[in-house]
Image (cartoon, rainbow, N blue to C red):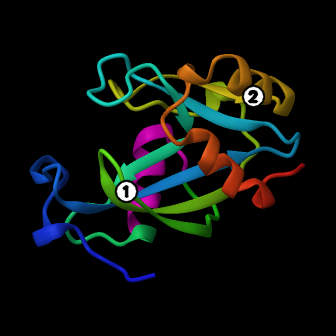
Amino acid sequence: MTELSNKDNKNRSEIISSDIYRVTGLWVENSLGQVLLVQRAFTKKNEPGKWGPAVSGTVEKGETYDSNIMKESREEIGLINCEFKKVEKLRIFGQHNFFVQWYFAKVDKRLEDFVLEDGSSECLKWFERKELKSALENTPEDFTAGFKVNLTLLRNFLKE
């Protein structure tokens, strides 16, 4: 897959709909096999109030995928000193056009030990596998676009 950088090396606020940009995403699982999800803030421009991966962010000018996921994890949920496994990279076409580099981490923390970024998210939740599967089947509108596809691609990194 050809690697592209943000068009004209732009920062997130400068990206327009015709630009191809780069993002990162982090799936977090604990030793009980639960998956950590974040509910996006209701004030977000894109997909407000939807459940999505624990961390996601736009790769800014001067950043790499690796440096961005470390920064976003620290800023969004207070996750530091964690080992991230680089997994799937996808090219997404549609309303937004971007590359997404996915990461996976095994983390055993209580919800109250995470620190949510002000204004970015409503809450975090550890989802049991059966609960997540049921929610995806019964209320798919509660999840971000592409959530089910992205989760399917990363299943081999999550306990079955």
Q: Is residue 95 above or below residue 117?
A: below
Q: Earlier in the sequence, mark 1 or mark 2?
A: 1
Residue in the picture at 10% in, 71% down: 8
To which residue does mark 2 refer? Answer: 132
The amino acid sitting under disc 2 is: Leu
Q: Is residue 92 left or right of residue 143?
A: left
Q: 10 Å neighbourhood of mark 2: few (<14), some, or many (≥20)?
A: some
Whether residue 77 is in magenta: the answer is: yes
Residue in the picture at 18% in, 60% down: 19
Percent coordinates x, y for residue 145 in the rendering: 48, 36
Q: Mark 1 or 2, which is nearer the eye? A: 1
- Label 1 to label 2, Cα distance in Å? 26 Å
Residue lying farthest to the front in this orientation: 94
**Among the 4 quarters of the image, the one containing residue 103:** bottom right
In this rendered view, identify the residue nearer to me: 54 or 142: 142
Q: Is residue 128 left or right of residue 55?
A: right
To which residue does mark 1 refer? Answer: 93
Residue in the picture at 38% in, 27% down: 47
Q: Examine the residues drawn in magenta and state their main secondary structure.
A: helix
Q: 10 Å neighbourhood of mark 1: few (<14), some, or many (≥20)?
A: few
Q: Is residue 52 left or right of residue 151?
A: left
The residue range painted magenta reads 67-79
